[in-house]
Image: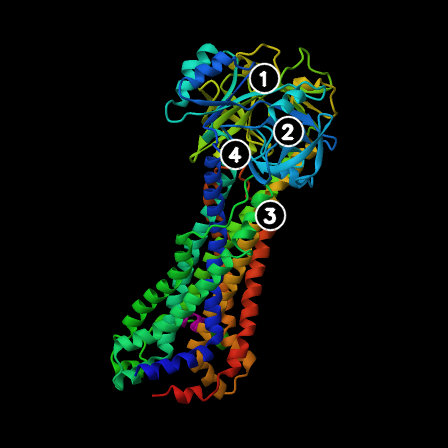
Amino acid sequence: MNKVLNKRIKRDLKSNFLRYLALFLLIAFGMYIIVAIVGAADTIITGTKQMAEENKVEDGQFGTFISLSEEQEETIRDMGITLERMFSVDLSQEDGSTLRVFANREEINRIHVDEGCVARTDEEVVIEKRYAEEHNLTVGDTIEIAGKTYFITGVGSVPEYDMPIATFSDTAVESSLFGLAFVTDEAYEDIINTEYAGVETYCYAYRLNGVATHEELKDEFLTVEVNNLTSFIKAENNGRIHAAAGDLLTNRNVGLVAGIIIMILFTYVISVFVIHQIQQESSVIGTLYALGAKKRNLVSHYIMLPTVISLVGGLVGTAAGFSDWGIAWQMADTYMYFSIPDLEPGYATYLIIYGVVMPPVISAIVNYIVIDKKLSRTALSLIRNEQKVSHRSRVNLGKMGFLRRFQIRQMLREARTGLTVVFGMFITMLIFMMGLNCYVLCENVRIDSSRDATFEYMYTLKYPEETPPKEAEACYLKSLSITDKGYTLDVSIIGIDEDNKYYKAEPIKGKSNVIVSSAAAQKYNLSVGDKIILTDSADDMDYAFTVKGIAEYGVSLAFFMDIKSMRELFDEEEDYYNMLLSDEELEIEADRIYSVTQREDIERASSVFTKLMKPMFVMMISVSIVIFIVVMYLMLNVMIDRASFGISLVKIFGFRTGEIRKLYLNGNTAIVAVGAVISIPLAKYIMDRIYPFFIANTACGINCTFPIWYYALIFAGVMAVYFAVSGALVFKIKKILPAEVLKNRE
């Protein structure tokens, strides 16, 4: 009997080739998207953390106005703490970019050289890899720094600058404008003594080595003996460290959620598919029963082909995910944004199991449950193809025309399959909206930043002059932090006058009153009257504020205060300021400037998000469209197969193909249209609620809104797919012969 059944497998595959092909594509594309996105994220997350530990990434860092004495440094080391200077100086290059120059590291935050070697002589330099890529610099080239020519002996990265940004308040990387350079100790001393050098920044990195805590280092030494502490940042609160891993957490979360959604869809489609197959071959199964076939033989036979198709689909999808068009493609833009070592794509065991083992296992389980239940009937019942009588199609439709009456009754008869189409549409729309939200968010960040950055120049100052320039607006800027959803991000407190022309905020006097930027309000779901706690990590102090208003400002996570109230709160002089906004370039001594930001820098930086996330949202949108087409084809194909007896009957009565299409296919238009009207906004609503958790580690607003015409365009796309698939199935209708009636009579 098994030989007889096995011969049917080849015939079944040939006769239902398109159906099995669609099932194969559904599984392959589903596994591809999961393996590519999650595999790339796992590679970056695991690889960067491992490389950071190998290069002795810091546990934290602190900055001072004046460098510590050797005795003070030794006191810290005597606590069992490893301490190393990370002094630096920023130098302007001829192309307008800035190079931050360091001396070589010995014990902490060591340089990982991808090409070449570290600088060993006073004429050699290692260039940070992202800056090198943007400026077409390679090993063997020369570069001029502080009026002297250096030979590039290496290109690499350091673990505390995963995200190579100049200041912690920067929201995006722009490596064409900022990079790092590493020279010998002697070369560094020469550079800081040249006329090109600005003010040297005193920063110390430390590793606790398990013998002390951050608080012991800070409280028992720094705040007691050193009164010039400017910052104290733990590694976990440093946005530059493990930045790539943090960013890819979003991708991994998205990929895993997409995987769950795809598996739900896959399982449901398989169940409908198998139920239809059993109903279609009920008489054959009954005959085989009557001839002595065992139930276990039939179960094995009907499980085999879908399971093999699922296995092959999983293999192909997983292989594609691990290929250059999968993980490597997803990783490419991470390398184009973050400064991280080159990593070999990882082949996580759980992903291989997920992609290769899970599809056939799910297929086998679903098939077994459904087939076992269907094969529990008697041979006679199966031969007669007895079905449960549904009373849905007997609804009184009144005095309605024949065509509309027939379409409605057909729709009621196929309600289960119709609901499957709607369910499949909703599931694929969730994946589609996940990708679309990613694109919309990135574009809104770019648009909002360009709109709200109304100044041409922003100067943050180390040592401001007593009187600000008349042509500039003086502000007070201070960085605090906020912890939400497990992530700590820096936010800006900006003290302004009520007539500040560059910000739309109207500050309210009071040391606890703030006006929240629209970006921060979106990020932290803030409304007028809410309370919020912000932390000063340098002073280990929490500040409670009340939201008094929301200002349209999408450039950064900002909180606006009345400048006089802010000075009082942070105990500054009544005329203190440290930031200038201007429409024109200002003449300020270089050693007074901490950083200069131009409007075009903000616009360029904000556009980086779209470039960085492009592989993910392109993949999500493309694959969701393919999956939707496949599901639509499978379900409408099932409807045609189930209606083959009726179609053959109406052909006997002389109905033409076009008329049959109206009777059996066009009636589904209403189901698809209503399903789309419900599914599209519902999927958008759900994704909008989930998305903040995906990007909890990103310092930007969460503006996922898009114009109303997007909904119309998506709806038009859904209907276009439906009509295209419906048109393609007309060929299947043509192949149904009137003789089908004779085959299916008792």
Which type of secondary structure does the marked residue at label 4 adopt? helix
Q: Earlier in the sequence, mark 4 or mark 3?
A: 4
Q: Earlier in the sequence, mark 4 or mark 1?
A: 4
Q: Amino acid at mark 1?
A: Ile
Where's residue 647, x and y in %?
47, 81
Q: Which sits in the foreground, 149 or 6? A: 149
Residue 369 against residue 558 in the figure, above or below:
below
Does residue 506 appear left or right of residue 5 in this picture? right
User: Badge 1 is on which residue?
Assistant: 563
Where's residue 380, x and y in %?
26, 83
Distance Cα–Cα, label 4 vs label 3: 41 Å
User: Badge 4 is on which residue?
Assistant: 159
Q: Amino acid at mark 4?
A: Pro
Q: Residues within 10 Å of mark 1 (few under 14, many from 20)?
A: many
Distance Cα–Cα, label 4 vs label 1: 37 Å
Q: Which sits in the foreground, 316 or 678? A: 316
Q: Between label 4 and label 1, give the one nearer the viewer.
A: 4
Q: Which sits in the foreground, 44 or 275? A: 44
Residue drawn 58% across and 32% down? 556
Distance Cα–Cα, label 2 vs label 1: 50 Å
Q: Are marks 4 and 3 in contact (CB under 8 Å)?
A: no
Distance Cα–Cα, label 3 vs label 1: 37 Å
Magenta segment: 408-415
Residue drawn 41% across and 61% down? 356
Q: Between label 2 and label 4, give the one nearer the viewer.
A: 2
Does residue 367 appear left or right of residue 719 in this picture? left
